[in-house]
Amino acid sequence: MRRSRLGLHAVALLGLLLSFGSAGADTGAPAAQTLGVTIEDFGYLDTSGEPIDQTSAHQKRLQAFMAALRRDVGADAHYRLIPPSTDDRASPAERMQVAARGGANILITGAVQKMSTLVQWANAVVIDIGTNRVLFERRYSFRGDNDEAWNRAESFVSRDIRAALAASLAASPAAAVVPIELAVFDFELEDTTAAAAASGITASDAAQLADVTSGVRELFAQSGRYRVIEIGGANAEAVKTHTLRDCGGCEAGIALKLGADQSLIGVVRRVSRTEYTIGFQVRDARTGDVVSRADSGLRMGADYSWRRGAVRLVRGHLLDSPSQQ
């Protein structure tokens, strides 16, 4: 049996849940327009019995898993990330107190356990610190032990956790809606087909890209979580030439000048006349950090299906209710 040194393993997770007691009963955590959220490093337990020690690989994947989860939660302006306790010897109640003193209203904890070569379990728990109430608890089963499997698992766990946080926020009378100011730049076309127009995109492609951009902007505007700002005042060269995808993150600074909190760029990559992929990337306008990205993978369909694919990708990755794994 091998155990990662990162956080709690699956057995200790049960002890954490049983030890909360009244730790958060008198926290003094502010009832603000946002929820303070502490995300503890998930534990890892390997009970697969495999002869090769994979501790280092597991630590790296778990660190990437936690970084992605914190990035997903932190991308929503309704939530303030509060650092967890760094004292490995602290008891569950003491860690709760540290989170509460930092201003956390919610604590997220969990663990991953490798059962066999192909099967792993992930547990996630969301707890209201003030009431000591478990808001959400779920066990996931995922196959594989590679980067793709871990990324897929994080995506499912993240969506469910964010849905639980949204429900908690909606139930809090003190939590006002503070929409994120989002600059959605025009979607761009990356045409890799042999028939790609040497002089640039065709009028038909331009019309379809405009339709994609319109659909995504409408989706964000209707969500209530974002306010889509006007980008007509942006005159940067990368905006005018539709090459933001190649400008090394310059879209964040452009969005900041427009008064946005975040920027979004999207790309349609045409592989053939009937095959395409769609990707998007969201950056924090102040720091330039990537807070969310996604890619649809290869899809079938002509240009008229671009809008549907883009809307589905954005809704599923950022806006939807939790998906079942």
Image: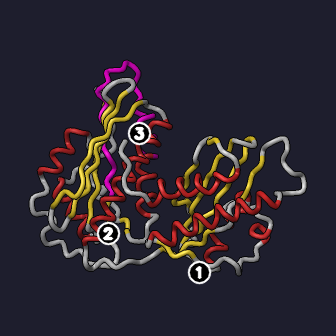
Sequence-earlier tag: 1 or 3: 3
Q: Is mark 2 on a helix, strand or loop?
A: strand
Residue at left offset 26%, top offset 68%: 105
Toward which corner of the image does residue 144 lie, by quadrant?
top left
Alpha carbon distance from label 1 to label 2: 25 Å
As for residue 282 lying within the magenta part, the answer is no
Q: Quadrant of residue 272?
A: top right
- In the rendered image, residue 1, in percent from the top left (x then y), is placed at 28, 26
Q: Which residue is drawn at 70% across and 51% down?
A: 303
Asked whether residue 48 is drawn in magenta, I would say yes
- Reading the image, the residue beneath label 3 is 59
Q: Helix, strand, or loop for circle 3? A: helix
Quadrant for residue 3, please give it: top left
The kind of residue on which mark 1 rests is Gly
Q: Name the residue under label 2.
A: 36
Q: Residue at x 20, y 38 (%)?
A: 11
Specify which label sits upstream in the sequence, 1 or 2: 2
Q: Residues within 10 Å of mark 1 (few under 14, many from 20)?
A: some
